[in-house]
Image (cartoon, rainbow, N blue to C red):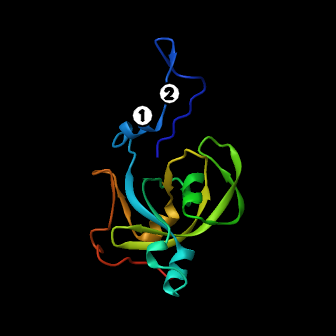
Amino acid sequence: MLRLTIDKPLAKNGKMIDFTKEHFSKMEGIMGLVYADIELINADYIGLAARGFIKPEDVLSVKVRALADSGAYMLGINERIAEQLDLRVLGEEIFTMANEERQRLKIVGPIEVRFKNRRCTADAVVLGENTEVLLGSIVMEDLDVIIDPKRQELTLPPDRPYLAEKHMK
């Protein structure tokens, strides 16, 4: 994963460049960035619906476009998604960010992550308010998916497209 560190503000024609979400969405497909459409679901609500305490249509879920980041350890979501899914705060941990800054961040969950015909349950770290969703290496391994660098997409392994394969040793 390519990381860009900026020591001083970038300017064009004397004006500051605003790196907005729209700017980064235009960068999709270049510099090796791989995005995937995933669904995030509050796993507590799935359990409540399975036991008849709530209706299945009341299970909270959101479909998002996530950056498949093999350099990230776990699932990363923003505060808005954590609130939208009504996720429980499970604790806090210290994280070293891409810029080497250490931050104390909330862990929320449980979240069911769905991609194509795969699913897993994970906790997530709550990143900044406008941060894009990061699909980290632990979740990708649990889903048994691979990053195809040639096609620049997250995909299922060609030798096991129907069932995930996991190692228990």
Circle 1 packing at 10 Å, graded few (<14), some (14-19), many (20+), is: few
Could you tell me the amino acid type at mark 1? His
Identify the residue under disc 1: 23
Sequence-wise first label, 2 or 1? 2
Number of marks = 2
Q: Residue 111: which quarter of the image?
A: bottom right
Can I make out residue 34 in this image?
yes
Residue 52: percent from left, percent from top? 51, 86
Q: Secondary structure at mark 2?
A: loop
Q: Residues within 10 Å of mark 2 (few under 14, many from 20)?
A: few
Looking at numbered disc 2 in the image, what kind of residue is underneath it? Asp
- Which picture quadrant has residue 157? bottom left
Residue 143's spot in the image, x, y percent? 43, 70
Residue 141 lies left or right of residue 109; in this view the side is: left
Front-lying residue, 66 or 80: 80
Q: Secondary structure at mark 1?
A: helix
User: Residue at 33% across / 43% down in the picture?
Assistant: 29
Q: Which residue is mark 2?
A: 18
* Residue 16 screen position, x and y as percent: 52, 20
Q: Are marks 2 and 1 in contact (CB under 8 Å)?
A: yes
Residue reaching furthest to the bottom = 51
Q: Is residue 36 above or below residue 55?
A: above
